[in-house]
Image (cartoon, rainbow, N blue to C red):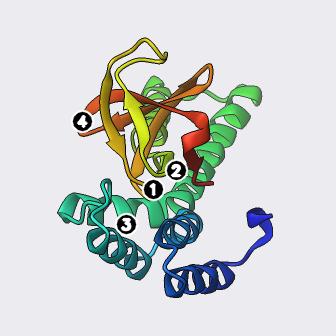
């Protein structure tokens, strides 16, 4: 349902939820809008709402502004970088097929470019996040009921999702790996 919703509609739904006092739902709609079209205004509204309700995961710092800029221009920049890689690769391959000599330096430069492009994709890829959707959601040190409790999260807390294991999401909590049940976390997509 949310996949077909425009950014404007998401912001309107967030406004309505905020007016009703449902700040976790408002944060979720803002997070989906932020995921689709990252803007400083949306991020500032999210941090404002989070600070007013004492929620975790909404740090506002120079690092978050750099990440916001990278997220905003990630796809257009990636498209340009991939287009250059395909164009140069096509030219090099065409010369090779026509039996025209290509200097080794060109192949080395192309290989380095592709390696840097792979690094760009892996390092600057937008992070997967999720919002805690239930009050008093338990965050555990391991993926099981026998693991020790780390803390209890509030509805609306924002967590970076690192993966999934059985019925648990592997998340980042205060710089350390933790686990939360899938039913307690809504992924922002």
Q: Which residue is mark 2?
A: 134
| Quarter of image, res 54 | bottom left
Identify the mark at residue 69; answer none if there is no mark: 3
Callout in the foreground (2, 4): 2
Describe residue 57's horizontal placement relative to residue 71 as left or right. Answer: left
User: Do the residues under discs 4 and 3 have CB atoms within 8 angstroms?
Assistant: no
Q: Secondary structure at mark 1?
A: loop
Mark 1 residue crowding within 10 angstroms, few (<14) / some (14–19) / many (20+) = many
Q: Secondary structure at mark 4?
A: loop
Q: Nearer the viewer, residue 9 or 127?
A: 9
Looking at the image, tell me whether mark 4 or mark 3 is earlier in sequence order: 3
> Picture coordinates of residue 153 (x, y %)?
37, 46
> Picture coordinates of residue 172 (x, y %)?
35, 36
Q: Quadrant of the N terminus?
A: bottom right
Looking at the image, tell me whether mark 3 or mark 2 is earlier in sequence order: 3
Q: Which residue is mark 1?
A: 155
> Picture coordinates of residue 108 (x, y %)?
43, 26
Residue in the image at 59% along x and 86% along y? 16
State the separation of the CA atoms marked 2 and 4.
22 Å
Q: Quadrant of the C terminus?
A: bottom right
Looking at the image, tell me whether mark 1 or mark 3 is earlier in sequence order: 3
Mark 2 residue crowding within 10 angstroms, few (<14) / some (14–19) / many (20+) = some
Q: Which residue is mark 4?
A: 175
State the separation of the CA atoms marked 3 and 2.
31 Å
């Amino acid at each position: 349902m949310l996949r077909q919703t425009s950014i404007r509609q998401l912001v309107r739904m967030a406004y309505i939820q905020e007016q009703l006092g449902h700040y976790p739902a408002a944060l979720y709609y803002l997070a989906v809008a932020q995921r689709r079209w990252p803007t400083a205004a949306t991020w500032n509204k999210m941090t404002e709402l989070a600070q007013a309700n004492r929620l975790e995961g909404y740090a506002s710092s120079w690092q978050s502004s750099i990440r916001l800029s990278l997220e905003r221009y990630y796809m257009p920049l990636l498209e340009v970088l991939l287009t250059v890689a395909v164009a140069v690769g096509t030219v090099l391959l065409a010369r090779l097929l026509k039996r025209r000599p290509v200097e080794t330096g060109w192949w080395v430069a192309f290989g380095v470019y592709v390696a840097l492009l792979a690094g760009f994709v892996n390092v600057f890829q937008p992070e997967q996040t999720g919002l805690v959707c239930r009050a008093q959601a338990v965050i555990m040190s391991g993926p099981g009921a026998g693991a020790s409790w780390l803390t209890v999260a509030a509805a609306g807390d924002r967590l970076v999702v690192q993966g999934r294991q059985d019925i648990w999401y592997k998340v980042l909590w205060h710089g350390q790996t933790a686990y939360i049940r899938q039913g307690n976390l809504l992924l922002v997509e």
